[in-house]
Image (cartoon, rainbow, N blue to C red):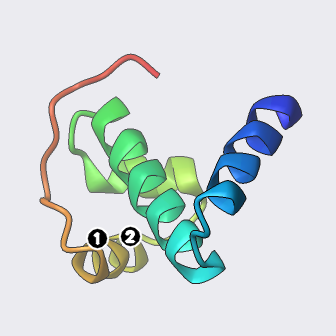
Amino acid sequence: MRQMMEELIAELVRKDIPLEIAKRELERIYLEMVLAAHNGNQSAAARHLGMHRNTLSKKLEQHQAPVRYPAVNC
């Protein structure tokens, strides 16, 4: 996993992506994928992430992410 992360980070550096944008996009995509893996169930996704459901809901609002997602295999 470390090698994959290093390759992704190297690509971000090559494309001059600022750290704040990279962190924001990583969080947004990660939250979306965890939520999708739990069929849009915010309570289950929040438990998986180790946070309160209200915290997850606020993060989703910050990212302007929809509340429900189709299931995906992660």
Query: Nearest the camera: 32 or 14?
Result: 14
Q: Secondary structure at mark 2?
A: helix
- Give the residue displayed 76% in from the left and 38% down from the top: 7
Q: Quadrant of residue 57?
A: bottom left
Q: Is residue 67 left or right of residue 47?
A: left
Quadrant where the image shows the N terminus: top right
Residue at point 21%, 43% (across, down) = 40
As helix, strand or loop, the secondary structure at mark 1 comes to helix
- At a point 53% along the width and 47% down the height, the residue shown is 48
Query: Residue beneath label 1, please?
Result: 60
**How far across and how far down the image is residue 43, in percent?**
34, 55
- Quote the CA–CA distance across marks 2 and 1: 6 Å
Q: Are marks 2 and 1 in contact (CB under 8 Å)?
A: yes
Mark 2 lies on residue = 56
| Kind of residue indicated by mark 1 | Leu
Residue 29 falls left or right of residue 66: right
Frontmost residue, 17 versus 3: 17
Q: Residue at x 14, y 58 (%)?
A: 67
Left or right: where does residue 66 sit relative to residue 30? left
Q: Residues within 10 Å of mark 1 (few under 14, many from 20)?
A: some
